Image (spheres, rainbow, N blue to C red):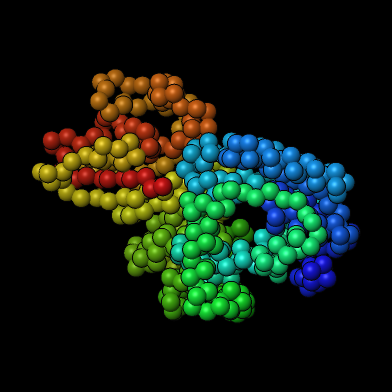
């Protein structure tokens, strides 16, 4: 196992003996085996441990085991704890995603502060299979079906060559202590559903299914590299760089087939998702002037080109909702629909849905952060109120306040998104056309 481990590191050019490695160690079998292999292979390591405070005394037990490993391997220890459930709720993401975000952000901070060369994590071959099906279930392109890379920036995965059975055998032969995470058996987590339900069923169809899928993922990765090269060559043909901007020829774009796929591949690294790309494709047959914004860039449909520009820092706080848009993904995920008012229309009883009088607004509407001094007329009230006072009355925490976005009609607030509509834009008996805007989680 050690020789295969060293060969995998060498073949994939992950790191060498002169590099210092920060190892993410949870206390579970995978990370304990990774740490032991690195130590026995002669690499210089330090240990990083996160307590996510999700399993009470069990999480504390993991931390105690990792402290024992520090003495065994004579390695520096960095540890921290997170209120993961609170973070997930505040950011409206799953517990799994919250733990991942917190872990990698902290790992990188430690790596950069203490000048480690790489961060090693203990993903293995079976994790690759789970990742394949997770991405497949969510919907993904070719790259999403190739699995995790051995190296992604400063993150390295030296155990991707090994199966779970091989890791367990190594642990047994080397008498390594580890902690079993009871949540690994829970079907509440998506990976566990794949691990305990889907993969065993697939093996009833083909006992060599795991090995076959790993080979298939390798083939897909090779094809992905060929596609990436072809897309890069096409991009160089249709786009001209001018300073920090790109001018993308509309005439050249229209010659591409399938156009939406090409354009998505061109723009995904600039923060545009497939929904927005679909709107951009539709705009090619429209009049010039329409603009689309991601977190980092703005794209304007000009007469002969699409002009792609990086956002200036002050513009990253302002986004626009154009007339006819059905969905906005950044900076807050919204679905938009317009309709005539019907007699049986009923306003949804949800602060995450705003129904406003379409004829009282003028596009494009602006989405921005709230600012000190902002005021609005809360739905159902006669007078105006400072938004800062509304937050106090609503008992919003500081992180919640910092995460609030405003939908505005010029200088006027239409909706404190996810909280309260302005009374000036409400549906009335005289309303003829309704604009419905819904937050998506």
Q: Is residue 315 visible?
A: no
| Residue 36 vs residue 228, the one in the foreground | 36
| Residue sitting at x 67%, y 37% | 60
343 on left or right of 418? left
Q: Residue furthest left?
A: 343
**Image quadrant assignment for residue 326:** bottom left
Q: Is residue 50 visible?
A: yes
| Residue 389 vs residue 313, the one in the foreground | 389
Residue 312 on image: x %, y %: 57, 47
| Residue sitting at x 50%, y 75% | 204
| Residue 221 vs residue 318, the one in the foreground | 221
402 on left or right of 328? right
255 on left or right of 101? left
363 on left or right of 9? left
Residue 206 on image: x %, y %: 52, 79
| Residue 420 vs residue 169, the one in the foreground | 169
Number of disc labels: 0
Residue 416 on image: x %, y %: 38, 34
Residue 349 drawn above or below residue 223? above
**Image quadrant assignment for residue 158:** bottom right
| Residue sitting at x 80%, y 46% | 69
Quarter the N terminus occupies: bottom right
Residue 395 drawn above or below residue 283? above
Residue 436 on image: x %, y %: 27, 45
| Residue sitting at x 75%, y 44% | 66
């Amino acid at each position: 196992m050690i020789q295969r481990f060293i060969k995998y590191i060498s073949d994939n050019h992950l790191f060498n003996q002169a590099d210092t490695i920060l190892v993410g160690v949870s206390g579970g079998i995978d990370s304990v085996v990774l740490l032991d292999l690195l130590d026995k292979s002669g690499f210089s390591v330090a240990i990083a441990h996160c307590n996510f405070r999700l399993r009470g005394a069990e999480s504390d037990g993991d931390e105690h085991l990792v402290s024992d490993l520090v003495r065994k391997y004579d390695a520096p220890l960095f540890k921290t704890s997170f209120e993961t459930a609170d973070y997930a709720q505040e950011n409206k993401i799953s517990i799994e995603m919250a733990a991942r975000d917190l872990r990698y952000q902290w790992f990188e901070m430690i790596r950069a502060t203490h000048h480690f060369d790489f961060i090693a994590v203990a993903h293995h071959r079976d994790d690759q299979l789970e990742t394949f099906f997770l991405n497949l279930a969510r919907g993904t392109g070719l790259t999403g079906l190739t699995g995790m890379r051995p190296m992604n920036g400063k993150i390295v995965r030296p155990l991707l060559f090994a199966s779970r059975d091989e890791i367990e055998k190594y642990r047994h032969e080397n008498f390594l202590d580890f902690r079993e995470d009871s949540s690994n058996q829970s079907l509440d987590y998506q990976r566990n559903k794949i691990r305990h339900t889907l993969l065993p069923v697939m093996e009833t169809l083909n006992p060599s299914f795991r090995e076959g899928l790993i080979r298939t993922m390798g083939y897909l990765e090779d094809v992905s590299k060929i596609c990436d090269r072809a897309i890069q060559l096409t991009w160089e043909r249709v786009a001209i760089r001018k300073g920090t901007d790109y001018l993308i020829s509309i005439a050249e774009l229209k010659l591409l087939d399938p156009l939406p796929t090409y354009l998505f591949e061109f723009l995904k690294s600039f923060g545009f998702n497939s929904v927005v790309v679909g709107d951009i494709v539709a705009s090619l047959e429209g009049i010039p002037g329409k603009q689309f914004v991601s977190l980092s860039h703005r794209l304007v449909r000009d007469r002969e080109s699409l002009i792609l520009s990086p956002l200036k820092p002050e513009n990253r706080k302002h986004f626009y909702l154009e007339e006819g848009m059905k969905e906005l993904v950044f900076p807050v995920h919204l679905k938009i629909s317009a309709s005539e008012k019907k007699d049986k229309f009923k306003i949804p009883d949800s602060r995450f849905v705003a129904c406003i009088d379409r004829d009282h607004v003028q596009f494009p509407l602006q989405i921005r952060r709230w600012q000190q001094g902002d005021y609005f007329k809360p739905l159902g009230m006669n007078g105006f109120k400072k938004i800062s006072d509304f937050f106090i009355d609503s008992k919003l925490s500081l992180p919640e306040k910092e995460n609030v976005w405003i939908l505005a009609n010029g200088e006027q607030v239409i909706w404190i998104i996810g909280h309260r509509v302005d009374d000036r834009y409400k549906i009335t008996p005289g309303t003829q056309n309704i604009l419905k805007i819904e937050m998506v989680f």
